[in-house]
Amino acid sequence: MIATLASDLRALVKDGQVLDSPSELCVFAYDASFMTQLEPRVPDAAVVARSTADVSNVLRYAHERGIPVTPRGAASGQAAGSVAVQGGIVLSVHAMDHILEVDVANMQAFCEPGVVHARLLEELRPTGLTFPPDPGSTRMATVGGLASTNAHGMRAVKYGPTGAWVLGLEVVLPNGDVIETGSVASRAKQSSAGLELTKLFVGSEGTLGVFTKLRLKLMPIPPARAIVMALFDVLENAGQAVQAVFAAGISPSAIEIVDQRCIQAINLYRPLLGLPEAEAMLLFEVDGNPPGCRWDAEKIVEVVTPLSTRVEWSDEPKRMTALWEGRSVVGAAVGLLRPGSNRAYCGEDICVPVARIPECLRALQDISTKYGIPIATYGHIGGGDLHPGHLIDARDPDEIARLLRVADEVHELALRLGGTTTGEHGVGAVRAPFMAREHGPALETMRAIKAALDPKCILNPGKIFPA
Ligand SMILES: Cc1cc2nc3c(=O)[nH]c(=O)nc-3n(C[C@H](O)[C@H](O)[C@H](O)COP(=O)(O)OP(=O)(O)OC[C@H]3O[C@@H](n4cnc5c(N)ncnc54)[C@H](O)[C@@H]3O)c2cc1C
């Protein structure tokens, strides 16, 4: 049956685009989630699509036969979203990676889904335009993956999620039909024409359709930036500082937190940065014109000083780069806190109301102590999105069992505090069991939409919707 599947697929797309040998397929058994380290799922076949027609042909074939299809970008996702948990075909669009057009006058980019985020920004730079969503996975994640998970990133606190920057999509539906959302052939930047299908597909995590082209909104690169660094010896004060800055009427372009363990990790990874010991560090970035940035930065210093042990601001490029580097290496650096350990992406993406951040930070430390699993927390605190990084010895079954309980408690904590189990990474397979509790009766409405578009449930089964 599996041999037939591969030979059938070879009749639909070019021979070299179908992979079915065990060594090739094992690559598709993982993404960046801890779940797939525990339970890798090898698909029956993988197709590397090169065109919309390839995607359509594969979906039409799978739809007729009821074969599961899992769309896949760069597999940097942390929720097992791009892994075929029910077998079948993995349909990778990473090789559809052309930037088709940059329309400078209308501030839009037309891309295939496999364009990697950092490459898009590089190509846009000479035009003076940019695409503001700013994930930590910039050098890996594809624009299709970002739209599919409605990814956020550091600057979402000011510029919103990826969905705010997607004007239209070419989508291949589960039965192989192709539609364009956002008004066919439109280059308008806004529209009130009919149901907002673009918004429906954004964040659908490959369960409703496969994106084969994206029309992205761009904005001018802000001419200036400045950074304020603030250290706190009381964790709760860091949370209060965020609220105080908003209350002062400032809208920073990023507000990031790293906790005490992260500061230690950054110092181990980049000793030259020499960050002082503290319970937490906040980085506020402001952008705009140079006098405005200076004014905002000085105002943040004024507001945060009573809560902080040390505050400094800079618009000097070398200092700003060094501070941002400290933040960007933290995910990798935390492993140094416990040599031989894994940083496990599991219960790693909760988001709570800004007013409850202090309580949440303290509760995460309590969970860490209760289960004896070190947790180093960092995240986009301006939007309430926190990334607890759990450090475990993945060779120890007892630690794995405790980690899974930690992840459950972290998700429960987020819901108890009036937040969500995922602020930006998505539900995938790992958070599906929490969706009934998170959405209540609205989950049935989501199921009805899924059933209308994909009655045979062939597209990314086992994701978002609990069994
Ligand atoms: C170090 C690191 C840092 C990260 N930082 C951030 C961050 O700051 N903010 C953030 O939001 N996320 C972050 N992530 C998570 C991840 O990068 C994002 O979820 C990203 O959007 C996934 O893109 P991808 O191309 O890797 O998609 P994949 O992982 O391949 O797929 C993710 C989901 O999208 C679906 N999908 C992919 N392409 C398509 C398509 N063309 N059409 C339909 N469905 C599709 C898949 O089926 C799957 O459900 C980070 C990950 C890592 C490893």
Image (tube, rainbow, N blue to C red):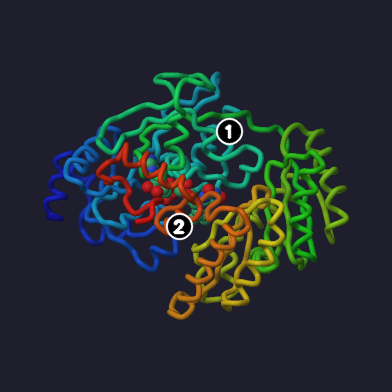
Q: Is residue 95 above or below residue 394?
A: above
Which residue is label 2 attached to? 431
Where does the N terminus fall, quadrant-wise? bottom left
Q: Residues within 10 Å of mark 2 (few under 14, many from 20)?
A: many
The amino acid type found where label 1 is placed reads Thr
Q: Residues within 10 Å of mark 1 (few under 14, many from 20)?
A: many
Instruction: Kindly identify the residue that appears in the image at 63 percent across and 57 percent down.
Output: 417
Residue 373 image-quadrant placement: bottom right
Viewer can see residue 173: yes
Which x, y percent locates residue 169? Answer: 41, 31
Which residue is label 1 attached to? 130
Left/right of residue 272 with respect to residue 64 in the rendered view: right
Ligand 1 near label 1 (Cβ, under 8 Å)? no
Instruction: Kindly identify the residue that appears in the image at 52 percent across and 45 percent down.
Output: 151
Kind of element beneath mark 1: strand
Which x, y percent locates residue 6? Answer: 16, 50
- State which tag comes first along the sequence, 1 or 2: 1
Q: Is residue 21 above or below residue 57?
A: below
397 or 449, nearer to the observer: 449
Which x, y percent locates residue 225? Answer: 73, 39
Kind of element beneath mark 2: loop
The amino acid type found where label 2 is placed reads Arg
